[in-house]
Image (cartoon, helix red, strand yellow):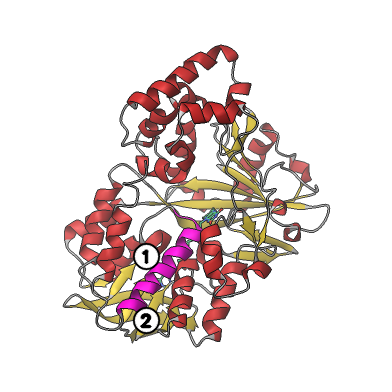
Amino acid sequence: MNVLIIGAGVTGLSIGSALLKAGVGITLLEKGSSVAGLAASFTKDGYTFDLGPHIFFGKKVYSKMEEYFDVDKVIVENRKLKRGIYIHGRIYSYPLQLSEILRRMAWRKWPKVLLEIATARLFGAGNEETVHGWVRGKIGKTLVDYIELDTYVRKLYGISASETSADWGKHRLKPLGNLTLWKALDKAFNPKVKGKRRFTYYPPKGIGEIPREFAAYVTAHGGNIRLDTAVEGLIVKSGRVEGVKVLTDGVKKVLSADFIVSTARITELVRMLEPPPPREVLDGAARLRYRDVIILYLIVARERVLDHCFVYYSTRDTWFKRVTEFKHFSAQMAPQNSTSLAVEICVDPGDPSWEYDDRRIFEVVVEEMERVNILKRQEVTDYFTVKVPAVYPVYYLKYQEHLGCMLDYFAGIKNLVSVGRGGLYQHDNMPTAIASGFDVAGLIAEYGRGKTDEIPATIYRKRLHKYEDTF
Ligand SMILES: Cc1cc2nc3c(=O)[nH]c(=O)nc-3n(C[C@H](O)[C@H](O)[C@H](O)COP(=O)(O)OP(=O)(O)OC[C@H]3O[C@@H](n4cnc5c(N)ncnc54)[C@H](O)[C@@H]3O)c2cc1C
């Protein structure tokens, strides 16, 4: 059996590695000139940068990865990774702790807050289809307003928390889901109750080490990784892909395979289909939207700038959403007496700021950084930007309908499956991407040549019902 995989991010690489292990031949087609996708690291003037902060939380997938490389040598546990969130001029621990909020809130508000949590847990609150209603149904209105949920969601997705699906909350704010008033109070005031310890790992030389190790496994085991090879079209006949059109080294070619796995954005995949799908599928694709990220990297003449590895800025005072300091992840990320930061700004596709030059972005950001007391302009010795398109799939209300319409259509193409962060329109992290990659490979290897017809529908069903059983 011969499988073509579109995209050499961590999803494509983990699928490729697992298929090779199961004896299935694979070729990875990557339009970029290196592997890793969003989990890339790059080095410049002695500094290593990631595309924003990347903590590896995946305890569950850790042991499975050991089948492919010596994980202990590549990633190390870093228990000191403190995360923060800036609200009302102060930095709180992230995830937020009720005890810390109450301590900093006027004590007169406590009875109201506690009563609201209790009633919210008993009776729910408002429209629980939206993330605003869902969070309010867990912690009450006063706390929702206090934590500036709406400001944060607007920065991330460009829409209000009332226009955002509760799926985002169920996925990204999991600890709130099963929080009871008793648990919250016990955790807040009983010193013996400790929070759940998170397994936080990081490769000392940048997150890109993980995809690099998978890529090394692929090449060492007979897999083929073709870089600078963009898939441009998929010729579909009688419910099967019969040809994969690629552009490689300026030459157009048509490849064929028994089965194709795509980790490209599903909205792009739709546009590759020849002949094009029905109008409603194209309409669904036109409505799904991903947000772009502008990352401003700064070199600062100081040993450390932040007390945290990253801080979210849930405030209208800044254009940026998060500031990361790489030295917290690993001392090897920057030389001594100097440090490097990544400042992330989320924008809609077509936003005029996408065209701003580095200096213009720097001027806006550094003025805000001074205002919120992060650093002084004269400490910055260098800066540059990287613009990453289509990073965040926006969980607007009803996105499920549009996604569902596309996945129903794709389920009819029996030898093609769309997976990964962009391929299934899911705001997931690396361990989920890797674990799902292993699962997909497991299904392909299990069914084998000619019997793979059920795989797409199985995977799409799982995606569409992903958040249903969550609280
Ligand atoms: C700012 C930021 C912070 C993050 N923080 C964390 C974190 O702390 N912890 C964590 O675990 N995860 C984090 N993530 C998420 C993590 O990076 C992603 O979940 C993961 O890398 C997704 O991998 P993927 O392979 O599914 O997708 P991608 O990385 O997007 O890979 C898709 C690949 O397909 C290629 N491709 C697309 N179209 C074509 C085509 N037509 N032809 C050929 N190739 C194509 C692309 O070039 C790309 O290489 C973060 C992501 C971002 C952006």
Q: Which residue is mark 2?
A: 3
**Some atom of ligand 1 lies within 8 Å of the CB belonging to the residue at label 1:** yes
Nearest the viewer among 445 and 297 is 445
Front one among 121 and 259: 121
Is residue 94 magenta-colored?
A: no
- Tell me the residue at 27%/44% (across/down): 398
Residue 257, given in percent of the width and then of the height, sits at 32, 84
- The residue beneath circle 1 is 419
Which amino acid type is shown beneath numbered disc 2?
A: Val
Magenta highlight: main SS: helix
User: Where does the magenta region start and end?
Assistant: 428-447
Indicate whether 58 appears above or below 359: below
Residue 378 appears in view: yes
Could you tell whether 254 is left or right of 276 in the image? right
Residue at 29% in and 73% down: 416
Q: Residue at x 46, y 62 (%)?
A: 433
Alpha carbon separation for disc pair 1 and 2: 14 Å
* Whether residue 88 can be seen here: no
